[in-house]
Image: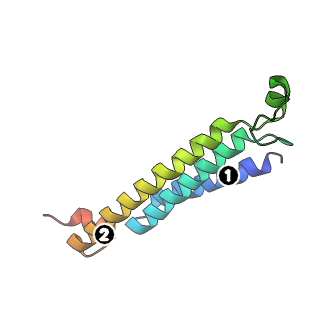
Amino acid sequence: MGITIYLLTFLLLLVAVYGIVAKKNIVKIIVSLAILDYALNLLLVLVGYRTGGKAPILSPGQSTEQFVSSAVDPLPQAMVLTSIVIGLSIMALMVAMALRLHEKYGTFDMEHIRRLKG
């Protein structure tokens, strides 16, 4: 697999951070946060990956040493599943807040919202 996939994941992280920091539109910031969430999930999966690894299921008659030497680490997989659920709920909350801001101020531009009083 090599280091290339890690570099591409890091590039995806950088694109997301750039979108969060540099963009002024709330919708673009929310999309950047979604990209950041997906990039972090991908990084967690890559950390737990093992070349030639098998599913983390103990077969009957298989010794613990054989299982540990051949199985993929299940902890990052469980963390990613939890992260997906939490990320989805946070995304729904951000979209709802963005819609309320748009109802109140009539724009998604953060610069315009910051200048308004009230």
Q: Which percent across, then down, holds residue 80?
A: 59, 46
Name the residue rendered at 86%, 28% in the picture. 66
Inspect this view and state whether residue 112 appears: no
Residue name at image x 54 percent, y 54 percent? 36
Which circle, 2 or 1, is nearer the viewer?
2
Secondary element at image label 2: helix
Q: Which mark is residue 102?
A: none
In the image, is residue 68 above or below residue 91?
above
Residue underneath mark 2: 99
Q: Position of residue 87 (x, y in %)?
A: 47, 52
Is residue 55 shown left or right of residue 76?
right
Badge 1 is on which residue?
9
Looking at numbered disc 2 in the image, what kind of residue is underneath it? Leu
Secondary structure of the residue carrying tag 1 is: helix
Tell me if residue 96 can be seen: yes
Q: Residue furthest front?
A: 60
Query: As displayed, is residue 43 above or below residue 110?
Result: above
Residue type of the residue flagged with mark 1? Thr
In primary-sequence order, the first of circles 2 and 1 is 1
Please provide percent x and percent y for residue 35.
Answer: 55, 58
Q: Is residue 58 left or right of residue 107?
A: right
Q: How many C-alpha atoms fall within 10 Å of the one at disc 1: few (<14), some, or many (≥20)?
A: some
Classed neighbour count for the residue bearing mark 2: other residues with Cα under 10 Å, few (<14), some (14–19), many (≥20): some
Q: Return the residue found at the far bottom.
A: 106
Residue shown at 46% from the left, 60% from the top? 22
